[in-house]
Structure formats: structure tokens, C-alpha cells
Amino acid sequence: MKNLVFGITISAFAFLSCKDPDTSKEDYNRAPMLENIADNIIIPNYEALQNQLGSFQASIDSLNTNMNQQWLDSVKTNWLEACKKWQHCKVFEFGPASDIALRTSMNTFPTDTALIESNISSGSYTLGAVGNIQAIGFPAFDYLLYADSDANTLNRVMNSPNFRQYLVDLADKMLTDVNFVTSQWNTSYRNSFIASTGTASGSSTNDLYNEMVYDLELIKNAKYGIPLGKDILDVPRPTYVEAYYSGYSNTFALENMHSIENVFLGRSIAGTDGIGFDDYLDYCEAKRGSQDLSVVIKNQFNTINTELTALPNPLSDALLSNYAQINDVYFSIKDQVLYMKTDMSSALGLIIEYFDNDGD
Amino acid sequence: MRHTIFYTLVGMAVFTASCKKEGCMDETASNYNHDAEKDNGSCEFNAPSTYLFTDANGNSTVSYSGQTDRLNQLEEMAAYAKGANSMNVSATVLNDMFANTGDNGGGNFTFSSSKNLKSKCFVLDTNMLMSFFDSIEVASNDYTMTAANGQAGTLTSGTSTYLFSANGIEYAQLIEKGVMGAVFYYQMNSVYLGDDKMNVDNSVAVDAAGGKYYTVMEHHFDEAFGYFGVETNFPTNTTDIRFWGKYCNSRNADLGSNATLMNAFLEGRYAITQNDYTTRDAQRIIIQENMEKLTAAQAVNYLDQGVSYFGTDQAKFLHVVSEAWAFINAIKYSPVATRKMNTTEVDALLAQFGTNFWNLSTTDLNTIKATLVSTYNL
């Protein structure tokens, strides 16, 4: 009898909740959410990246007149800031970004140092080629600027025209790609993004949702899972971390986590809370157990951010000295994937359209 | 009860309004009117819904066993070529299969047939395909290696393992789709549906005593259908589909290609039985134009996949780009009268792939795609 009452309660709840495609979830007005995310998050973040990459490129271009420590310091600082800005854009891999495969072009790691060296020594390469995907982007600079001592790096800069040219060409390509995506958003794509208010495959809400979850899984797998060796019986692979040579792995992971959190909350680049997926979930009265699903996800972001902040640096060393601590972060992110992938998709009626290829 | 009375009254009113009911009195017409007492010339004849046609005595007039043999031959050839991901393959074996040496592909086919693929190609295409056989043999020498730019070998994605040449080309795809284009597509659209094969006798059976109840024209049209790779009850049956039939079904969601192409085959073949050559010609143009569009759309689909695999899955990237190249190559076999791209334009588009697929960028793929999208309104 108790079970029966429970069953009735559940079905009554299901009827009232968003799980029924004919009820409120379809009524939710997604336009303000899309507008907020486009105007206050996506476009400003691309513009910030564009500006910072512009400074980075300018600092590299000044090397012919200033081949000194000051030059190297300024290039490194600009690279670090640009890479942080990039972490806030990589989640938007749909529309113009996916047309040119921006995410893989900017940040495929680990980088192929042998291929980079062969490109430099030959002086002949097509940086946009699929065969060069592991020889370009931020990871290539991580190697070129940080693998050796500053003195040796400067020595190479001064003595190798091919090396200098490779730095220039890499930075130019990154800026060209980001210019393209930013200009697409600033012209036609913004309006078509906002106008696509449905939830079907190919709609803006579905694109955004899919990429948000996919990018979260990339943090879990690429930034931590593969280095932790989750697919090879937990044998760590220190050289597979992001930013292996500079050691900024955890810094970038934290920025990336913030960017996903910002999209979820609808939080602007200036830190102002706006309409996001949390409001959408609340409108649909989405629950996990007795708690609001939006609260569960927010709390989990807080947990992950605290854990990421506490990780020892560099990650490549910590994998050997503090494996369990990193492993805990991995599982915290994994929980968040469950909430955002499984619970959210059923609450909002959105469909995960990508397949997990990492075999984890 | 009230309804029954109402309908009865209306029916009676209509019936009594005319003294002799007029309508189509031919039982084989689609609008045959059982109640008609006077034929008013309104009969309409519709094609059957399956590719089954008979003569006045009920004998089947449909025959395309030669095409089925060639489809079977390519199936075994393609399977052999794809085996290059785990063994050395031989250009000699592929040549024997292609030419059907000794009626059994030099002992490499599981069946015998008097038909072969090679004699159905132009010399230039024969040379192209034979160069692919040589290339896959060379690449397969390195099947134990991991493929990289400048290194032949295999790459795996999920459960699929592909062999690539040192230039990142999957020759197994170029061979299979190459024959699909140079033989199946070319023979269907440019040969059997061409004027020379259609302006033939349609009055007498080729050899009724020998079981060939079809006219020459009927047979030519059936041979075109035989290269489509579907069963007579397509698209109800989308399970037993091969080659072009398979890709027609793949693109059906975007193009509605299943009904368009099958209806054109049914209507065109039916028109031949009715000596209605205006309809036949309209239908063969539908087939020719839509086969070309389907081929372009499949290439675009692979190019889109290429962009999405760019940098994330090299195996799939090189695989789908090889497919895209081969589908674009097939466009060149389109009939001169209906084609949207001539052979020079197709070659120019193929040239944009370059000779080394490892050097392709998203810009390259998007540029190639843009040409197809605008040419075919995709």
C-alpha cells in the first residue's frame, strides 16, 4: 500500500514536472537566456581573447628589435593571459568555431615536439594541415617558450631565423582563426544564434548544452583522466598534462571550469549573474532527490573549484607525489558530468549528441 | 442509424442524377470505377509500387542478373581491399577480380560469372583504378605500422581500423567508390539511360522461346535499375541495399532520395510498357539529376564529418576525406546533357584535395564543400 501511494506521488510529480514534453519545459522562453549568453558571455569572451592574442602577437613581432630577457618575459606573460582567455572560449565549439575546428587548432596536447622541430628545421609547413594539429596552438608555445632555460631559448631566438619565423607563423594563425570566429559572432551568427529558440538537434540551446557538457568531459578526461592513466589501470602519464613545460595545468583547468560554470549560471564576463541554465532548470522544477538540481550542480562547482585550487603544482609532478588528491578531483568532476549529462538532459529534454570516444 | 439513412439518401441522389454513370471501365487502371456503365476516357494508369513487370501472358520481363553479378564482384573486391588493414594485399589479385580472370576472378571470387567490371570502364578509368591497386599493395606492406604523415600504416577509431598510404589516402575507399562511379554510376546514368540505349526496339520480346520476354528497351532500363543496388520492393525494403542504394538511403532524410529515385525507376519502366516515351524521358532525367545530386550530397556529408573529426580523430578524418574524394570523383560520370559539373570542373575540385591528405585544413574542406553546396543547392 505504501508503495502504491509512492507510485502515485511519483507519477503526479512526473506529470507536473518538465518531463512531459507537452508541459512547461516547452513553454520556457529561451530567447532571453540565449541573448544573455551571447551578448554577455560568448562575444565578450571572444573579444577578450582576440585582444589578448593581439597583444601576444605584437609582443612576438617585436622580437626583431628586442631579443632580450624583457622580450621573452613579455611574450610569456602575454601567452599565459591569452591561454587563460582561451579557456573561457573553448566551450563554444559550435557554429563558426566548429566550422574551422577552433578547439583542436588552438589547444591539442600533448604537442608533438619532434614534428615541431622538423617543421622548424625544414622551414616548410602548412600550419592549418590536419597533419600539423599537434605542432600548433598554445601547446606548441608551451614547448617553444618553456622547454628550455630562458638563456637557451633566447640564444635560439637570436641564432635561428626559422625558429623566429615559426613563432610568428603560429601566433598569426591563432589570431587569424580567432578573428574569423569573433567576426562571425559580431556579424551574422549572433542573430541566428538568438533566433534559434527551440530545443531540437541543431538549435542553439541544444548546441550550447552539448558543448558545455562535452567541454566538462574534456576537463575530466584530457586534463586529468588521461594523465591519471584512468584507461591504463591508473598508471600516471605525467607528460600528457596540459601545459607540461610551463606547469600551468591546474591554472588552466580552473579557468576552464569557471567558464563552464559561467555558462551554466548565465554569469557575464564582468561577474554579473544573468539568465542561464540554472534558471531554466528552476523553471522546470528539476530535482535531484529532494534538492533542486540547479543547487546540486552549483554546489558541485564549488566543491570542484576548491579542490582544483588546492592541487599542488606542477600537475606533472603532483601526479607522482599526490595521486590520490588528483584522483579525488577527477571523481568530483565525474559526479558533475553525471548531474549535467544525465539529470539535466532528462529534466530539460535535451539530447546528448556526441559520443564518448576516449574509451573511459 | 441516422447516418446510414443519410448516406443512403445521398448515394441514391447522386446515382439517380445521371442516367448512365460515366467513368473509367478498364480494370487495370488506377481509377477503375466499378459502377461505371460508360467509359469516358478518364482512365489513369499508375506504375506498380514494386519493380515487377510482366508481359501480356504474365511472364516476368525484368532481368538484370549481369548487374547483380557485378555488384557481387565489387562486394568481394572491396572486402579484400579493406583487408589491407591487417594483411598484405596484392595488386595482381585485385586486377584478377577487376577483370574477372577465368570467370572467377583468378580464383578469388566465391562464384563464377561471365561478366566483369573492367570491360565496362573507359581506358582512363581502368588506368586510374589499376593505379589504386598498386597503391594499396604498397601501403599494405606497412600494415603493421602506425600511419603518420609520410608513413603508410593503420589508424584505429573505436572498432574500425583503416589502412592509409604514406599520403593519408585510404585506397580501399577509392577502389570501392571508384568502381561504383566508373562502372555502376556511369553505366546506369550515361549508358543504359542514355539516348543510344533508349532509342531501341520496344515491340518484340528479345527471345520469348529462350525465356527473354523483355524488349530491348525494357532490358536496358532494367540494367540501369540493376546498378542501383536495391531490391524490387525498395524503399519499403531498406535492409537489402548495396552501394548506391545504401547511399541513397543514407541521404534520404535530407533529400527524400529514396522515393524520388525509386518512383522514377518505376514510372519510367512502366511508361516503357505503355509506349509513353515522354514520361520515360522525364523519368530518366529525374534519375540522372538526382543521382548526381545524391553523390554531391554524400560528398558534402563526408566533408562535414571531416571538419568535425579534424584534429580529434585522425583515423576518421582521413577515412571520411577519402570517401569525399571518391564521391566527388564519381560526379564526373554524369551524362553530359544533365550534369551540373563537367569533368574539368570535377578534376579542379579534386585537385583542391592535393596529393597528401595530411596537408588538408578545415579551410580546404570548407572551400570544396562550398562549391558543391552552391552548385547543387544543398
Image: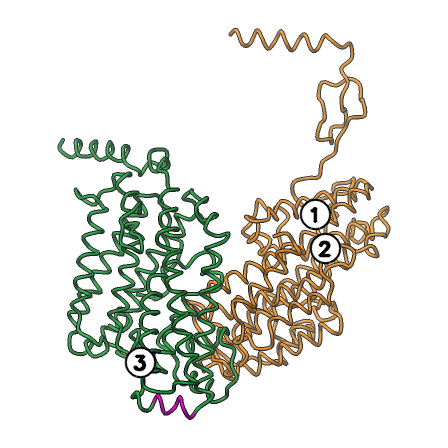
Chain colours: A green, B orange
Q: How far apart are marks 3 and 1 (CA)?
A: 71 Å
Rate crowding at label 3 as few (under 14), some (14 to 19) or many (20 or more) other CA atoms within 10 Å: some
Amino acid carrying mark 3 in the image:
Asp
Q: How far apart are marks 1 and 2 (CA)?
A: 9 Å
Residue range of the region highlighted in magenta in the rendering:
A153-159
Horizontal side, residue B165 vs residue A6: left or right: right
Amino acid carrying mark 2 in the image:
Ala
Where is residue A211, by image quadrant? bottom left
The disc placed on residue B158 is none
The residue identified by callout 3 is A73
Rate crowding at label 1 as few (under 14), some (14 to 19) or many (20 or more) other CA atoms within 10 Å: many
Asked whether B130 or B360 is in front, the reply is: B360
Chain under disc 1: B
Q: Which of marks 1 and 2 is nearer the N terminus?
A: 2
User: Mark 1 and 2 residues: CB-CB less than 8 Å, in contact?
Assistant: yes
The disc placed on residue B224 is 2
**Measured from the top left, where is residue A125 in percent x and y?**
51, 81
The residue identified by callout 1 is B265
Where is residue B111, by image quadrant? bottom right
Where is residue A171, by image quadrant? bottom left
